[in-house]
Image (cartoon, rainbow, N blue to C red):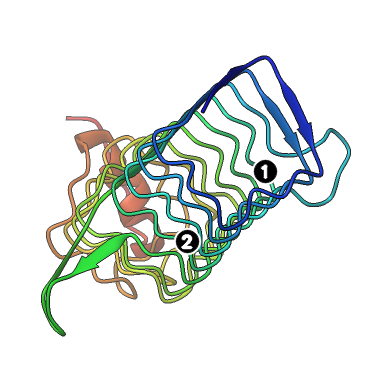
Amino acid sequence: MNKKNEVFEGVNFSHQDMNDSHFEQCKFYNCNFNHTDLSDSHFVDCSFIEQGAVSGCDFDYANLQDASFKDCQLAMVNFIGANCFGAEFRNCDLKGANFLKTRFANQISRQVYFCSVYMTGCNLSYANFERQCIEKCDLFENKWTGANLYGASFKGSDLSRGEFSSDAWGQFNLSECDLSHAELYGLDPRKVDLSGVKICMWQQEQLLEPLGVIVGPD
């Protein structure tokens, strides 16, 4: 399916095979993509919520493996239980999106797995990532203000140039992450495991401030 500049309102796409579809500048209002196969599909400059609405489209348990969303309006969209392994979200508005039980990992065995998702330049304010495992992935230049990161693991991921709420630190595993150029206010190194974390020289002042250490010029 290839569509451009079309409006879909109240359409039920659930349980359909729509893999490798291409949509550009389309609008989806109150549409249902539950259990839909959208693997390898591409969405460019599309909107999935009507202006003024309090909820977006549903992608619950959809197959979004290797799907691509670029410059899309995805605020308040539900991705509950969706397969997002290998998916990409570039410069999207995902404010308030729900990623509860969304799958970003390929489970090889009970203890062996690897994650794959590209989520960059996105507004993730108030999005729900509770207990998500998104390790060793590109997650840079995102706005995480007010996001629910409780119990999540971003171990080894690139979180550079990210914007976090001061109370977010300690909610999630950030060991081995790249935090270069991210605002670190509220991050207390006495309470958070910073093993292998990468920062820039100028960020030392923010990191040491909770310890009462004053960093002066060289």
- Quadrant into which the C terminus falls: top left
**Foreground tag (2 vs 1):** 2
94 above or below 33? above
Sequence-wise, the earlier of marks 2 and 1 is 1
Residue type, numbered disc 1: Ala
Query: Mark 1: few, some, or many residues within 10 Å (few <14, many ≥20)?
Result: many
State the residue position of label 2.
82
Tag 2, which secondary structure? loop
Residue 216: horizontal and vertical position, in percent? 27, 37
Q: Amino acid at mark 2?
A: Ala
Badge 1 element? loop
Which residue sits furthest top? 5
Whole-percent x and y of residue 183? 42, 42
Q: Residues within 10 Å of mark 2 (few under 14, many from 20)?
A: many
Residue 57 in the image: state x and y as whole percent: 70, 48
Label number found at residue 75:
1
Query: Is 13 in front, or is 124?
Result: 13
